[in-house]
Amino acid sequence: MANPTIAIVGRPNVGKSTLFNRIAGERISIVEDVPGVTRDRIYATGEWLGREFNIIDTGGIDLGNEPFMEQIKYQAEIAIEEADVIILVSSGREGVTDADEMVARILYKSKKPVLLAVNKVDNPEMRNDIYEFYALGLGDPYPVSSSHGIGLGDLLDEAVKQFSTDMEEEDDGTIKFSLIGRPNVGKSSLINALLGEERVIVSDVAGTTRDAIDTHFTSPDGQPFVMIDTAGMRKRGKVYESTEKYSVMRAMRAIDRSDVVLMVLNAEEGIREYDKRIAGFAHEAGKGMIIVVNKWDTLEKETNTMRDFEQKIRDEFRYLDYAPIIFVSAKTKQRLNQLPELIEKVSMNQNLRVPSSLLNDVIMDAVALNPTPTDKGKRLKIFYATQVAVKPPAFVIFVNEEEMMHFSYARFLENQIRKAFTFEGTPIRIMPRRRK
Ligand code: GDP
Ligand code: GDP
């Protein structure tokens, strides 16, 4: 099931990013233990009344040298394109400005539900200042104070109410995947080559507007797939589509909707910052991952070319050591026919459940091999392990002291679990819990 999306728009300095941080709380995607992964504060998940949603701060999408009014206009367009519910933020301190009016007009014309938040209403006396905002024609304004955390409950209640209820997608075994990568690495060429394969059946499924850009197809062995569209494939020529942040945001949205992410690298260019950032996000989101090195035909190959390239990737993406790497060429079609099968395998591994008895045997052997750490005369005791989730597989390990399960020991246990079971291509989670 795809999460609904809220987008925040408004002119600079009204408090968009403060509101975004409040709503996203601790859930802003940050890959802490991965050096070189930049923190993106434009896209996050949030939750209210048990509903999970995605949230975008369009103000964080840097639109370069465009004039001020143009930038806000593009941000509003992005919100209309990407979101299910839009929150227009204005400021009770400054009152209604020309820029507010312009954005309100653009949003008004869209069919999307728009909530008007009047921010910086830090105390009850200021509530009288919100009446002028009725003039924007967006219904009742919601007085909020993002920095004090006031009024957000009412705002989010209404936002959640506006989520349409028919977003459920049935789980019929269809595997959703996306190709993510920088411009020109060959994503479109790969897609065309994949879909152009004989015996691949592409179907026209009239889905929701959001699904309309996805491609449904069935592989030769009958497995249904959905390929999720990302920026770079559809060159619609809007100004903001070429900006880096927008492309990162689109990639993140595609990753969120995918079961398996194909990270496409260009054999000629190697690995860039963008790749690391995106890979870190997919890893955190618990998605299946395959590293696809495209344009393999362009390299002069010697005996160790593939091995060296693989080593380079492993060095750069240490935390992705579970991701299979495949060297392909969209041009010569080399190894392309192996891709659907590999995606299927990774998806299966993501859904793998291991029986508790086998799991505990593996853990006990692991502890015998490498005793648990001690601290101040006390030793970490492991009582029992059990798998609590799939997609990604997650293991709760009951212990005497949670804090004593150091990163390195959790990592060791993860490796032992990986050796015993087939979790290739999927991250797994190790979660120590104190036994009560
Ligand atoms: P953005 O440019 O719209 O993303 O705005 P920011 O979130 O960066 O906020 C701009 C300024 O307004 C910062 O100095 C914030 O601390 C301040 N601010 C944000 N929310 C509130 C609020 O609810 N009350 C007050 N008094 N200041 C706020
Ligand atoms: P995208 O921006 O990631 O969708 O990349 P494209 O699919 O548009 O490809 C960018 C360029 O790389 C085009 O000129 C393609 O013809 C070329 N290209 C794509 N895949 C390959 C490949 O496997 N080998 C070679 N030699 N060129 C490729």
Image: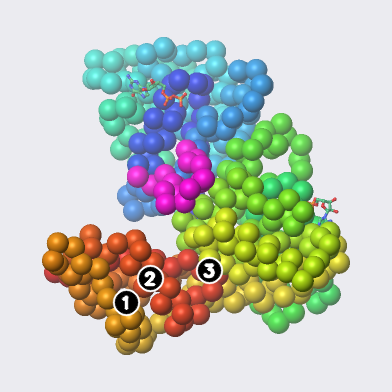
Q: Residues within 10 Å of mark 1 (few under 14, many from 20)?
A: few
Per the image, the residue denoted by label 3 is 322
Q: Position of residue 384 (x, y in %)?
A: 25, 78
Verify CB contact (< 8 Å) between mark 2 and mark 1: yes
* Amino acid, disc 3: Tyr
Vertical arrangement, residue 124 with respect to residue 173, above or below: above
Residue 107: quadrant of the picture: top right
Q: Position of residue 388 (x, y in %)?
A: 34, 72
Residue at the spot x=20%, y=73% of the render? Answer: 381
Mark on residue 370? 1
Per the image, the residue denoted by label 2 is 412
Q: Residues within 10 Å of mark 3 (few under 14, many from 20)?
A: some
Query: From this viewpoint, is residue 50 visible?
Result: yes
User: Is tag 3's residue or tag 1's residue first in the polypeptide sequence?
Assistant: 3
Nearest to viewer (mark 3 / mark 1): 1
Vertical arrangement, residue 419 with respect to residue 34, above or below: below
User: Is tag 2's residue or tag 1's residue first in the polypeptide sequence?
Assistant: 1
Q: Position of residue 302 (x, y in %)?
A: 80, 68
Nearest to viewer (mark 2 / mark 3): 2
User: Is tag 2's residue or tag 3's residue first in the polypeptide sequence?
Assistant: 3
Which residue reaches farthest right? 332
Nearest to viewer (mark 2 / mark 1): 1
Magenta stretch, residue numbers: 26-41
Residue at the spot x=68%, y=62% of the render? Answer: 309
